[in-house]
Amino acid sequence: MFVRKFTLRDFRSWDAIALEPGPGVTLFVGPNGHGKTNLLEALGYLSALSSHRVSTDAPLIRAGATQAQIGAVVVNDGRELAIDLEINDGRANRARMNGSPLRRPREILGVLRSVLFAPEDLSMVRGDPGDRRRYLDELLCSRLPRMAAVKADYEKVLRQRSALLKTAGGALRRGTRSTDGASALATLDVWDGHLAAHGAELLAGRLRLVAELGPHVASSYRDIAPESRPASIRYRSSLGDSMPPELVDPDHSWIRDDVELLEASFLNELAVSRQREIERGVCLVGPHRDDLELHLGDQPAKGFASHGESWSFALSLRLAAFALLRADGADPVLMLDDVFAELDRTRRTALAAVAADAEQVLITAAVAEDVPAELDARRFGIEAVSTAAGRISRVV
């Protein structure tokens, strides 16, 4: 898979650009703050419908504009697909495929598969569980685009149920002792059912993914840091003791992905946690409370890994994602955002070996010499200039 052409309009610092990177290695070189990362961020957004740098869309639209546009022509096994996305300020985003409007932007998921490694990835090791959940969900939706709808449904129900816990807290605490309490409890029962149904499907998808991903993480980490302790990953579910023994293997390393049993376990844990949830006014059970545990030897990576080990683990997570997507039948586009400068010789060599074998690699660097010489790259210079409309980026 590779991007034959991509275009931007009013995205971040770019007013308009059209590039044809083609297969192989393409290097974007320029000083920090001149717009290199914005190019990879745009393609990453087309791939995942989210940015690796910000959680909202507003910063993606160039100052003074009301809409940003991203377009790409993606070639996969000789077949071309054109996808276009409009990011709107204050309105729903819109997408087209081969010029035809789509009902929802998420229908373009899976057309462009990519793996982006960036300095922000260190947060997957050192940051909050949300960073690791996001890593799993983006990879899951890239492999199985229908899971984007499952995730969206789960998040919608979660918002509704959370609002009920907050706004009807008093009535819920009164319970069947009052008409309002009985009504609120009945409504909560309905939302519990929806939350368990969607949550069990999302959880099953994550569990399957982690089971497949684990060996690739261990292998990638071993290649990057052969002298370090072995790396492993494990999914930690908020279902806790409600998980029946038949769903867990003897050493508790992996949980089976039986959706019906997971849904029953989910409902049981919601019942166990109901009073605590009512008292606190928040949802305490579900995939939104889960974590991907990262271990080096017998210790958690977070808090115990050195700086170099943390970088190695972050890199191994991305390389594992690349290997898993490749195993599905087509190389994803590999994007490396100014990371070679952060890596020592061993890690540079390991990353360069993967990049040299990928169908398409897009790299940004402030200094061209940071990129290993064996990556024979087509090079674009990037600079920022000041205009009456503000600071914009251009190719030189």
Image (cartoon, rainbow, N blue to C red):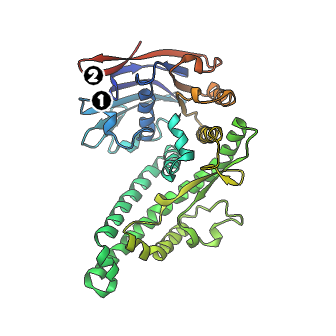
Amino acid carrying label 2: it is: Gly
Q: Is 216 on the left or on the right of 141, as rendered? A: right
Q: Who's the residue at 43% across and 27% down the image? A: 39
Residue at the limit of the structure toward the bottom, as seen here: 177
Q: Who's the residue at 34% across and 69% down the image? A: 165
**Vertical position of residue 22 compared to residue 229: above or below:** above
Across and down, in percent, residue 334 comes to 55, 31
Q: Tell me which corner region of the image, top left, top right, bottom left or bottom right, holds residue 155.
A: bottom left
Label at residue 271: none
Q: Tell me which corner region of the image, top left, top right, bottom left or bottom right, holds residue 24.
A: top right
- Neighbour tally class for label 2: few under 14, some 14-19, many 20 plus, Cα within 10 Å: few
Mark 1 sits on what residue? 62
**Vertical position of residue 102 compared to residue 396: above or below:** below
Among the two numbered marks 1 and 2 on one chain, the one whose residue lies closer to the N terminus: 1
What kind of element bears circle 2? Answer: strand
Quadrant of the drawing holding the C terminus: top left
Q: Tell me which corner region of the image, top left, top right, bottom left or bottom right, holds residue 169.
A: bottom left
Across and down, in percent, residue 280 comes to 39, 70
Across and down, in percent, residue 251 comes to 71, 64
Asked whether disc 1 touches disc 2, contact meaning CB atoms under 8 Å apart, the reply is yes
Front one among 390 and 103: 390
Residue at the limit of the structure toward the right, as seen here: 227
Q: Is 171 on the left or on the right of 41, as rendered? A: left
Mark 2 sits on what residue? 390
User: Is there any visible trace of residue 359 in the rendered image?
Assistant: no
Amino acid carrying label 1: it is: Arg
Q: Who's the residue at 65% across and 60% down the image? A: 254
How far apart marks 1 and 2 lie (CA) works out to: 9 Å
Nearer the observer: mark 1 or 2; the answer is: 2
